[in-house]
Amino acid sequence: MEPRKSSPSVTHRRRIALDERTCRMICPIASAMVGVCLTGIGLLHVTITLRARQTVADDLLSVDALLFLIATLSSYFALRVQGTARLHWPERIADATFILAMLLLTAACFIITYALNG
């Protein structure tokens, strides 16, 4: 007897549903994080002006805002494609850029904390 395999259509549907949920989560969070980065840049410029101290944190936040924008746009385009011809590469781009942007945001937070306290 042959081993029983699960139906490819069920497995395929599960993968599509999982990917779509991920994109639906990344899109609004990443777009909100662009605003967080821009707010951080504005606050940093006010603090730098008052303390006359330069930091690379605003540059990191600018790059971070671009990464969050890439994550937002790629998850948006992945959600726009309907049917069996869904594009999975924008989903992978959204995942990777979102994680990279979150790591960069954490690094920028450390730099801001130590630059302003030092």
Image (cartoon, rainbow, N blue to C red):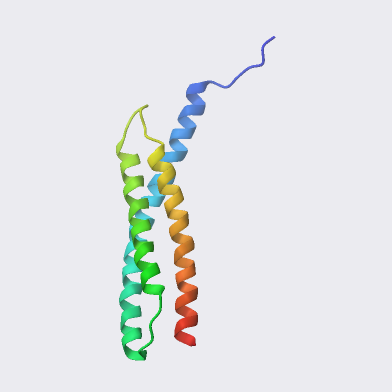
Name the residue rendered at 33%, 73% in the picture: 41
Q: Who is closer to the viewer here, 37 or 14?
A: 37
Q: Is residue 45 left or right of residue 20?
A: left
Whole-percent x and y of residue 103? 49, 62
Q: Is residue 74 above or below residue 15?
A: below
**Quadrant position of the N terminus in the picture:** top right
Name the residue rendered at 35%, 28% in the picture: 85
Whole-percent x and y of residue 44? 35, 79
Residue 53 falls in image quadrant? bottom left
* Residue positioned most to the bottom: 51
Name the residue rendered at 36%, 32% in the picture: 86
Residue 113 visible in this rendered orientation of the protein: yes
Q: Is residue 84 above or below residue 62?
A: above
Residue 68 falls in image quadrant? bottom left
* Residue positioned most to the top: 1
Residue 21 visible in this rendered orientation of the protein: no
Whole-percent x and y of residue 40? 36, 73
Q: Is residue 53 above or below residue 41?
A: below
Q: Is residue 113 left or right of residue 6?
A: left
Residue 46 falls in image quadrant? bottom left
Q: Is residue 45 above or below residue 26?
A: below
